[in-house]
Amino acid sequence: MVEIKVGKRTIEVQAGSNLREELLKAGFRLDSPCGGRGSCGKCKVHVEGKAAPPSEEERALLGADLAAGLRLACRVTVEHPLQVRLPDLIEQVKVERTSFAASSKLGAAVDIGTTTVAGYLLDLETSRVLATASCRNPQADFGADVISRLAYALEGGLDKLTAVIRRAVAELLVGLAGEERLEVLSHLVLVGNSAMHHLWWGLDPKSLAVAPYKPVSVLPKEEEAKRLGLPLPKASVYFLPLVAGFVGADTVAAALATGITEGSGTRLMVDIGTNGELVLATGTELYTCATAAGPALEGAEISCGMRGEPGAIEAVKLGERVEYKVIGDVEPVGICGSGLVDLLAELVRTGLVDSTGRLLTREEFLAQGGSQSLASLLTEDSFQVTESVSITGGDVRKLQLAKGAIRAGMETLLSEAGLKAEKLDEIILAGAFGSFLNPNSAIGAGLLPPVDVKKVHAAGNAAGEGAKLVLLDPKAKAKAEEIAQRLNYIELATRADFQTRFMEAMLF
Ligand code: FES
């Protein structure tokens, strides 16, 4: 055995074991979105002791950090005793709380997102939101996306994933209500996608990970909180029902909150993320599907892509010169999702990208009568947005695939319902991404069909809103269960017409 010292703790491991795996096994948190494949460069730890020198790939990812003694934990094999220092990654639960009476009857709603867990504390008598809190989903230590997380669960990590999310929700509840008030909290309502649901309940997610991607159960599930190890002696935990492997309780909750199922209008709800979840209501029927858009629209896997944080270009307009808006009062360092959709729409509008999605060369653009000033920003297979931020032809292709998948999903639902896009009364953008999206750009980039822009509305975190409604009103709970049953799930993967529409939707 070999000893690894981490702060005040010492862990004993077999010689030849992987440092990242051992740290995670011992309960330390480590950012590792690539799941230990050595490609994300995020699992940096400070290592002292005798460790084999880093490979060229590891050197490239570490850059200057190598000199500071940092290594990628997933690339280190433990052969000799090591001293390891972890970066301070334990994120605090962020809480905003108003004062409330000691006699308040409390309930909580929690939206378990793949990346972020958001919680709300409510007064069950007045319906007032007393506190909101959020934290990072700690399961991200075992893989950034649903696929790598399910893979980890299937490799024997299910109990660990269940334990860390329950612990995070427990911490969130303490942040929301204060430890002393958890006693009186009577109801906890949860929403999340189907993978988050299975990992929460500790259900074997094997059937979710392989075709035809079926959940173990789609039924709503209720349990006493204390049986799940939560610090709520008197509360029940209710998880909203699922619809299918890729249409979860979050979509059901969003459909409830947006009221899409009410009235006689034709409405389309779109939640754009790594998967685009869609719900179409025709007044009598409800249809739903999920499309694998990939993470490009959220800025991942795009050379200049980044999250919507300070330094991210969030809006772009191309005129004689490039106009852009950056989050925070800082120099731009990349582009986030809303900026990418703007940029894509502008590249198409100005003719810098042709209808097949190809970025033109400077000569081709000028030959088409394009402006000198924009042409000067075309370099070899890229367009320079700022001095340091550019988009490549490859990036455009990835965005094109993502928008093609979402748009083809919409067209398939519309055709299933025998409707044309122009007949839609409303398009509702659910989820955080939709709130930041410029509807004109979403239409210009072909992500949304060419409808009157006034018909497009953002609904914010509709899944969280739906969870709150269910917490407050038994009728809403019954309604959510009814919606889940009424939703006709359309499996796109097996449909030849989806493939045809996908090819068509790739064009601009
Ligand atoms: S480089 Fe991604 S986990 Fe190590």
Image (spheres, rainbow, N blue to C red):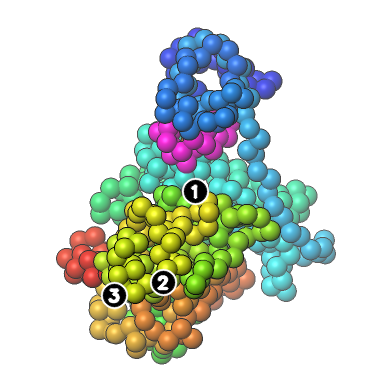
Q: CA distance from mark 3 to mark 2?
A: 35 Å
> Would residue 27 be counted in the magenta stretch?
yes
Q: Which residue is mark 1?
A: 200
Above-or-below relation of 91 to 429: above
- Horizontal relation, residue 9 to residue 358: left or right: right
Q: Earlier in the sequence, mark 3 or mark 2?
A: 2
Q: Which span is picked out in magenta?
A: 20-43
Looking at the picture, tell me which residue is in the foreground, 190 or 440.
440
Q: In the rendered image, which quarter is residue 353 located in?
A: bottom left
* Residue 56 x, y percent position in the rendering: 42, 25
Q: Which residue is mark 2?
A: 371
- Horizontal relation, residue 218 to residue 222: left or right: left
What label does residue 229 carry, if any?
none
Q: Around disc 2, counting alpha carbons within 10 Å, would you say few (fewer than 14), some (14 to 19), or many (20 or more)?
A: some
Q: Residue at x 41, y 72 (%)?
A: 371
> Would residue 149 be counted in the magenta stretch?
no
* Amino acid at circle 1: Trp
* Amino acid at circle 2: Ser
Q: Residue at x 33, y 83 (%)?
A: 421
Q: Earlier in the sequence, mark 3 or mark 1?
A: 1
